[in-house]
Amino acid sequence: MRRITRRIPRTARVPAYPVVEFDSLVWVFIGDAQSADPATVPRAPWLAASGWTTVRGLEPLAARYGLLVDNLLDLSHETYLHAGYIGTPEVAETPITTEVDDDAGVVYVRRRMKDVECPPFYARSTGIAGRIDRWQDIEYHPPCLYLLHARIAATGVEPAADGSDPHAFHAEIVYAITPETATTTHDFWLVARDFALDDVEVSRFLADSNRTVVLQDVAALNALESVIAAEPAGCQELSINIDTGGLAARRLLRRQVDA
Ligand SMILES: [Fe+2]
């Protein structure tokens, strides 16, 4: 047998990065390998936990990742962009509360809707026929992990005093926001649910619907990216009250970039 040389040409090398796998996601640390610390990775345990079923996908986005962050932190756009899926008039009409944990580096945006229309996304997946109480509790861990804790219940159904919530439906909508270039992004999306766990029809419906919703965002953000590229220098951005969460996110992102 001929002896195979083990010598690897020096120029054939590629950079290597530490990786760690949590909750069905692979995290890549692209900084100095010595300072990689798995303890700093934010978690999304529902994605790989028993008692939950997850559907997922990846759409390429021809826009900078920051535009996706802006989009996800202002869900009032659901009313206009995602009507017939997750958007109803009440989303844009209901005020939000925004909190920032500067030490932990997390932005929280909450919208609690009472006695509202149930959009098809939740009506068909949960089987709820009437009006609902609908919670949208966002938790954004810059730069990469976005968690939307969604609670859907027949109007008037409240969580128990001990915090358990057996008569409500819960969905964890997760985005693993992965920059590709300065102006393109891998838009990884996941929807985990704690109901209809083995129902393949519900899985198919949620996967198809959420992909459609993501593609509606992709079309809007791609258009926005081309508008930015065509803008004359010195254009000024206008922010309004609903952008509070997005502006807080940008501040934390700026801090991370500076560090
Ligand atoms: Fe959207």
Image (cartoon, helix red, strand yellow):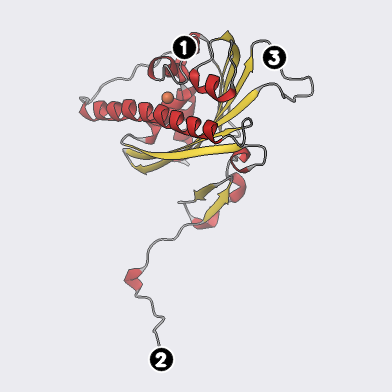
- Provide the residue designation for mark 2: 1
Q: Position of residue 135 (x, y in %)?
A: 59, 19
**Which is more foreground, mark 2 or mark 1?**
2
Question: Quick check: 82 left or right of 55?
Answer: left
Q: Tell me if mark 2 has few (under 14), some (14-19) or many (20+) residues whose alpha carbon lies within 10 angstroms of its own.
A: few
Q: Tell me if mark 3 has few (under 14), some (14-19) or many (20+) residues whose alpha carbon lies within 10 angstroms of its own.
A: some
- Provide the residue designation for mark 1: 92
Is there CB contact under 8 Å for labels 1 and 3?
no
Mark 2 residue element: loop
Q: Position of residue 133 (x, y in %)?
A: 61, 13
- Which amino acid, mark 1? Ala
The residue at the far right in this view is: 162
- Provide the residue designation for mark 3: 157
Q: Give me the residue at 59% from left, 45% from top.
A: 23
The residue carrying mark 3 has its beta carbon less than 8 Å from ligand 1: no
Residue 177 visible in this rendered orientation of the protein: no
- The part of the image, by quadrant, that contains residue 178 is top left
Mark 1 and mark 3 lie on one chain; the one further toward the N terminus is 1
Q: Give me the residue at 39% from left, 84% from top.
A: 5
The residue at the far bottom in this view is: 1
Q: Give me the residue at 33% from left, 28% from top.
A: 221
Q: Position of residue 9 (x, y in %)?
A: 34, 75
Quadrant (top left, top right, bottom left, bottom right) of the N terminus? bottom left
